[in-house]
Each structure stands twice: as C-alpha cells, then as structure tokens.
C-alpha cells in the first residue's frame, strides 16, 4: 500500500513522501475513512503514526471543496475549520510541528494554558486548524472567540477521560458542533462511545507488533539507585520514569551528585522550562531524562533506546504507555526495564562450623 492509494491528492502525496516512504497500518486504514467524511474511532498506540493519519485528511479539505466552499473562498474567508483536542501541551506542540511539515498549506494555531489568554486573541483572527488542550479551548469558547468547526479530532481520548477532562470536551463538542469526529485512543475505554452519541467506523489495529524487549528486575529498594547508575553509564538514550514529582526531584539530585548528566521534568515546572529541557533530550544534547508520567503519553522523541521504570507504574495502561516510548515504529527495537521492588532479603544466617 502506498500513500497514493489512499485517496489523497497528488500534491499531498508529493509532500508526505518527502518524509515517509509508506503509510503505516493506522494511516492506511484511517485516511480513506476520514476522507469520506466518516466518524472514526481508532484504537491505536502512540508510535503507530496516528498523528499523520488524522492530519493528512485535514490537509485535503477545501481542495475538493463544493460550490458553497468555493464561494466562501472567493470572499477570502477560511472555508474549512478543524479542531484537534489533546490532553497535554507537549502533545499539542508536537501535533502542530507535524502539521507544519506534512500539511504546510494549513494555518495551524496552538492553544494551551500557562500563557496569557490575550496572547491567543491575535492568533485566533486567522486559522484553519486549532490544536488545543481542553481547558484553554473551553475558555475561548466561553468568551466567544471561536465558532463552529467542520471536523473535530480528539487525540488520546482515553487520557482525556482519565484526566477528568471529559466534561470540558463535552462542552466543547456542544459549541463546536462538528460534522465529523475522529476519536483516537490507545486503549478501549467503553465510556468513550457513550460520551459521543454518534456512530463510528471502528479501526482496531493488530496488537503489539512493536519490537519492545521488556524485562522486570526484582530488586531491593536500597539497591535501585546503584543499578540505575550502571544502566545510565551505558550511554544510551534513556527515559527514567518516576511516579511522583518529589521522586523526580530526589532522583535528579542523586544523579547530580554522581555527576550523571540528565534533565528532569514534571508537571509543576513552568511550561517554557519543560519544553527547553525536553528539547535538550529530543535533540540529543543530553541522553537521560527523568520524568513523571507526563512523558508517558504521546510525546514523540526519536530513537529512545531504553525506558527504565524506576518506580513501577501504578496501572497496566500506564505501564504500556511508558514502555511504548521506546521502539517507535515497526522494525525498530527498544528495551524497557522495570524495577520491581522486593522485600529486603534476610541476611544469610551465620553457619556454625561443625567440627
Ligand atoms: P505518532 O504515532 O503519530 O506519534 O508517530 C510516531 C512516529 O512515526 C513519528 O516520529 C512520525 O514522524 C513517524 N511516522 C509517522 N508516519 C510514518 C510513516 N508513514 N512512515 C514512517 N514514519 C512515520
């Protein structure tokens, strides 16, 4: 299957093939449905190429515009509007970056909290696609800054539920009144379909065709740090996951004492700082990043060799997402290690010499 077999315009195919040779499974199955205007519910992991699967069809809109769209275009108004909702700011930025590459004709605006609302106003004067986190988007709807959209994409929809964003999302759907909805989710959350009273074409991909070697290391708590040090000394591009912000700070302090270069991020840090640190890791300035689950979802960093769960994830879903940070696409192999804490082993009793 090639990009040109999916119903995309010649121009789109020309652009996307500068970056990717062939569509991934999720792209091959989702793009034709979205181009037909269908609502889709796509079960797909991060790393499967889902971002391009929803962006490429958005890039086509207007090209095959009907009369009505054509007329609006003559008046110089934007004719097609899409909204992409995503749970985190990092993911929003990443989607916008991908959009600039593969659908450069679309004007993309990114909106998320942490920066003054007024700064968005100017940018909202002209846009084709908004990529936003739910809270900030709802703020804009409540202020009447944004109108209806044609297509709504909800990325990491299951995470939206987990993070308690679902009421915001519902309120946004009411305001945006999209004609088409694309739900993308890594896990099947039965509640999702109840939230959106529409019929969806479902796309479920084969389970785990990724190449991730994962192993548990059973270890006493007090020995974890020195084992970690051993792994980090191998010089691989590594993400270390901790369960809490305090844990991240603590481990960062320890690594600093040991002279191991790294960056550490968590949700309490200022957005700007977090991005700056992420980029250091992304562009290989530093090889090690310590993070809370902030990094477990969606963030695309190329060529992560190793994921270490210093703290074991709280639930299997999070675990899956964490280890999915390595081995991004089929064919690439990644390694993941989880430190599984065991009770301190009793010291062996002294054996009395028997004459
Ligand atoms: P995503 O699942 O959207 O986060 O994408 C994961 C990674 O795959 C990103 O680095 C994309 O740039 C890359 N990617 C997306 N589509 C393709 C493709 N058709 N071929 C190769 N790489 C791709």
Image (tube, grey):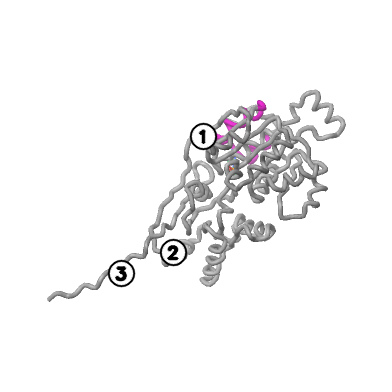
Looking at the picture, how far across and down is residue 341, in whole percent? 41, 59
Tell me the quarter of the picture where residue 23 sits.
Answer: top right
Q: What element carries label 3?
A: loop
- In this picture, residue 12 sits left or right of residue 69: left
Q: Give the residue drawn at x 65%, y 61%.
A: 269
Could you tell which of marks 1 and 3 lies nearer the N-terminus?
1
Q: Which residue was labeled with disc 2?
A: 224
Q: Which residue was labeled with disc 3?
A: 347
Tell me the quarter of the picture where residue 141 sits.
Answer: top right
Vertical comparison of 65 with 172: above or below:
above
Query: Which image quarter has ligand 1?
Result: top right
- In this picture, residue 285 sits left or right of residue 308: right
Residue 227 drawn in magenta: no
Q: What element carries label 1?
A: loop
Quarter holding the N terminus is top right
Question: Dot 3: within a 10 Å radius of its alpha carbon, few (fewer than 14), some, or many (20 or more) residues?
Answer: few
Q: Give the residue drawn at x 19%, y 74%.
A: 352
Looking at the picture, how far across and down is residue 24, in whole percent? 56, 36
Numbered circle sitting on residue 148: none
Q: Which residue was labeled with disc 1?
A: 205
Read off the magenta span: 13-37
Q: Which of marks 3 and 2 is in front?
A: 3
Question: Dot 2: within a 10 Å radius of its alpha carbon, few (fewer than 14), some, or many (20 or more) residues?
Answer: some
Magenta part mainly helix, strand or loop? helix
Vertical comparison of 32 with 303: above or below:
above
Q: Give the residue drawn at x 63%, y 60%.
A: 268
Vertical comparison of 227 with 48: above or below:
below
């Amino acid at each position: 299957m090639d990009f040109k077999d999916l119903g995309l315009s010649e121009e789109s195919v020309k652009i996307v093939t500068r970056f990717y040779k062939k569509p991934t499974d999720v792209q091959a199955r989702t793009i034709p449905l979205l181009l037909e205007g269908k609502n889709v519910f796509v079960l797909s992991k991060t790393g499967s190429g889902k971002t391009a699967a929803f962006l490429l069809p958005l890039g086509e809109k207007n090209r095959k515009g009907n009369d009505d769209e054509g007329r609006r275009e003559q008046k110089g108004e934007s004719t097609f509007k899409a909204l992409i909702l995503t749970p985190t700011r990092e993911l929003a930025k990443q989607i916008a970056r991908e959009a600039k590459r593969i659908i450069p004709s679309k004007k993309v605006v990114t909106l998320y909290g942490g920066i003054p609302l007024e700064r968005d106003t100017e940018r909202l004067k002209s846009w084709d696609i908004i990529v936003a986190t739910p809270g900030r988007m709802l703020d804009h709807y409540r202020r009447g800054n944004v109108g209806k959209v044609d297509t709504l994409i909800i990325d990491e929809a299951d995470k939206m539920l987990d993070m308690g964003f679902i009421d915001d999302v519902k309120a946004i759907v009411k305001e945006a009144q999209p004609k088409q909805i694309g739900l993308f989710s890594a896990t099947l959350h039965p509640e999702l379909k109840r939230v959106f009273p529409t019929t969806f074409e479902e796309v479920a991909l084969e389970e785990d065709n990724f190449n991730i070697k994962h192993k548990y290391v059973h270890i006493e708590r007090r020995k974890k740090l020195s084992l970690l040090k051993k792994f980090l000394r191998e010089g691989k591009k590594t993400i270390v996951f901790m369960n809490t912000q305090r844990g991240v700070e603590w481990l960062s302090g320890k690594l600093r004492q040991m002279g191991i270069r790294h960056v550490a991020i968590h949700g309490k840090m200022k957005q700007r700082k977090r991005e700056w640190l992420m980029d250091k890791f992304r562009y290989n300035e530093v090889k090690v990043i310590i993070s809370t689950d902030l990094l477990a979802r969606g963030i695309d960093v190329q060529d992560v060799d190793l994921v270490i769960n210093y703290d074991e994830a709280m639930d299997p879903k999070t675990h899956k997402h964490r280890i999915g940070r390595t081995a991004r696409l089929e064919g690439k192999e990644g390694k993941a290690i989880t430190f599984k804490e065991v009770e301190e082993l009793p010291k062996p009793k002294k054996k009395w010499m028997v004459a």
